[in-house]
Amino acid sequence: MIESLTGDAGVRESLEQLRPSGDAVEALARVSWSVLTEPGDGVAGALIEELGASDALRLALGAGNAAGPEVSSRALADGRARWKTRADARSVVDALRGARDVGARLLIPGDAHWPTSLDDLGVHAPAVLWVRGDPRLLSAAPRVAIVGARAASAYGEMLAGDFAGELAAGGAVVVSGGAYGIDGAGHRAALVVGGKTVAFLAGGVDRAYPQGHQQLLRRIVETGAVVSEVPCGTAPTKWRFLSRNRLIAAVSDATVVVEAGWRSGSLNTAGHAAALGRPLGAVPGPVTSASSAGCHRLLREYDARCVTTTAEIRELWGDGPPGTSPGRGTDPDQSRVLDAMSSRDARAAAELSRRSGLAPERVNALLGLLELEGAVRRVEGGWQRARVSERRG
């Protein structure tokens, strides 16, 4: 399939408009994978990781079982059964033309503005990103996700707007999902103050969803970015919304849930942030409010930080007042150790090594430095992250 596509003059022309430089064969292979697979397909991701996008595609659509140690013959056979139903060169051509028609850009890993934080998703990382707007915002820092309930209360929308507006005015990129409620309030507030905002969609970037946010998404394209991992023409589905949430969590330096019910989809985003070791904040609400039950659940079960001000949100990624977050933003290894810690539960150095991915000797050395700075404390059973009120100025 790749060979026939690279020989097509129309395909080459579309690709040059979407991505003026770079390896055309690699880009076409990755576009093909975005057509063949549903978001987060781990078997496809493992093949691409092992063989490269082009060789993985040839194996997926050809014969043989030499998939490598990470993909069993059974997994490859199951994958082929899924992928071959979409193995149509015309669909790849349509994806490229659809993106070209709406002025989208194509990003693949290794490009200048590819958000390398997505690589933390491993085999579940996206093969490509389709971007309308400014792709530079995906690698700008800091990026903070403001998410929450679609059926938000006036209280929730007010707080989301206040937080997003102040953060955007201070230079942060506000990331969300373009939905009604908290997402929309965050996007609008960032635009009002002249800040930057990025919306990740569950469908193609050519499809405004929800329909009521057509104008909002158009405004985001003008000064921010609208992003998706699925090709133009793809409809949003429940599964794609859930998969989209992992991108919001992975691309952001911190995730803040402003308001969420007990089973809100925002908890899915929060779960991804927690699994990736990203700082997670939750805004408390009235204990009698069903709209805040999910936030209270995050505070209790996910070790989320309670945030009530913009300054407290900035502390999540180490941009608070002097002395509020020692070591964050200077040594990335210190940040990894702090992200692996809890302010409530003691964790042994060995557990911190496992969670942070650092060698035990390195973790022990960093813990000593962080203890001197007042960022952590030694307690019975291991180590805890110090609360803000306990840290030295």
Image (cartoon, rainbow, N blue to C red):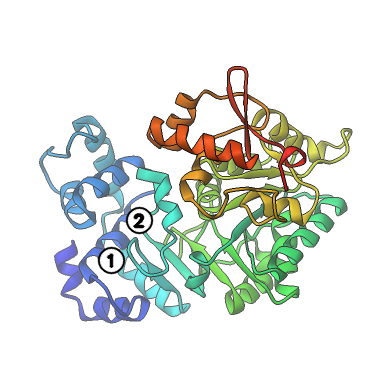
Question: Within 10 angstroms of label 2, few (less than 14), some, or many (20 or more) residues?
Answer: many
- Residue 111: percent from the left, percent from the top? 35, 68
Q: Which residue is mark 2?
A: 127
Q: In the shown orientation, is residue 388 left or right of residue 109? A: right
- Residue drawn at x 40%, y 30% is 360
Q: In the shown orientation, is residue 361 left or right of residue 349? A: left
| Amino acid type indicated by mark 2 | Ala
Q: Is residue 378 visible?
A: yes
- Residue drawn at x 35%, y 81% is 17
Q: Secondary structure at mark 2?
A: loop
Question: Within 10 angstroms of label 1, few (less than 14), some, or many (20 or more) residues?
Answer: many
For the N terminus, the quadrant is: bottom left
> Is 242 rendered above or below residue 77?
below
Q: Secondary structure at mark 1?
A: helix
- Mark 2 and mark 1 in contact? Answer it, CB < 8 Å: no
| Farthest-out residue, top | 380
Q: In the shown orientation, is residue 176 left or right of residue 137? A: right
| Amino acid type indicated by mark 1 | Ala
Q: Which mark is on residue 75?
A: none
| Farthest-out residue, front | 372
- Residue 92: percent from the left, percent from the top? 31, 65
Q: CA distance from mark 2 to mark 1?
A: 9 Å
- Residue drawn at x 42%, y 73% is 105
Q: Nearer the viewer, residue 160 or 94?
A: 160
Number of numbered discs visible in the structure rendering: 2
Answer with the quarter of the image where residue 292 lies. top right
- Residue 227: percent from the left, percent from the top? 51, 64
- Residue 43: percent from the left, percent from the top? 30, 40
Q: Which mark is on residue 27?
A: 1
Give the mark nearest the N terminus, 2 or 1. Answer: 1
